Amino acid sequence: MAKLRVLSEREVLSILGEFGFRSYSQKGSHVKVRRIVAGGLAQTLTVPNHDEIDRGTLHVIYRQASRFVSESELRGKFFTG
């Protein structure tokens, strides 16, 4: 069974950047990333600014991102194996 990788805020932002998400706001220790898709629809995610993001939080980010990006494309970047 694949295991969720331990990722930092920079790594998560880099992964999301590959799918067109860009930082647009930061408040405290949270960075908001957004991408605009056809029809002007904004897709927004929030990523905590931590050196090591808790696995539970990573799983939530993965689940939210999979609403916007194909799960098959995301899985290899968030999970081992």
Image (tube, grey):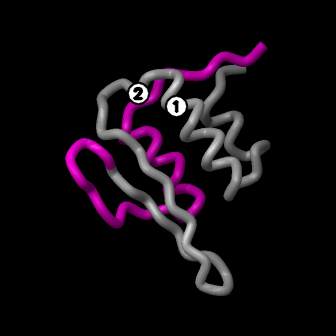
User: Mark 2 or mark 1, which has the lower sequence index?
Assistant: 2
Q: Name the residue under label 2.
A: 53
Residue 50, horizontal then vertical, whole percent: 30, 32
- Residue 41 higher or lower than 64, as above or below: below
Residue type of the residue flagged with mark 1? Leu
CA neighbours of label 1 inside 10 A, class few (<14), some (14 to 19), many (20+): many
Q: Nearer the viewer, residue 6 or 25?
A: 25
The quadrant the N terminus occupies is top right
Residue type of the residue flagged with mark 2? Ile
Is 6 covered by the magenta stretch? Answer: yes
Which contiguous range is marked in magenta? 1-30
Disc 2 + disc 1, Cβ < 8 Å: yes
User: Element at badge 2?
Assistant: loop
- Residue 12 higher or lower than 67, as above or below: above
Taking the view exactly as shown, the residue that stands out farthest to the bottom is 39
Tell whether 40 sits left or right of 53: right
Cα separation between marks 2 and 1:
6 Å
- Residue 57 higher or lower than 18, as above or below: above
Residue 52, horizontal then vertical, whole percent: 36, 24
The quadrant the C terminus occupies is top right
Taking the view exactly as shown, the residue that stands out farthest to the left is 28
Q: Name the residue under label 1.
A: 58
The structure residue drawn at horizontal position 76% and vertical position 52%, both measured from the top left corner, is: 70
Q: Which of 18 and 28 is in front in this view?
A: 28
The structure residue drawn at horizontal position 43% and vertical position 38%, both measured from the top left corner, is: 11
The structure residue drawn at horizontal position 70% and vertical position 53%, both measured from the top left corner, is: 67
Residue 68, horizontal then vertical, whole percent: 68, 58
Tell whether 56 sits left or right of 33: right
Residue 35, horizontal then vertical, whole percent: 53, 69
Tell whether 10 sits left or right of 17: left
The structure residue drawn at horizontal position 49% and vertical position 30%, both measured from the top left corner, is: 57
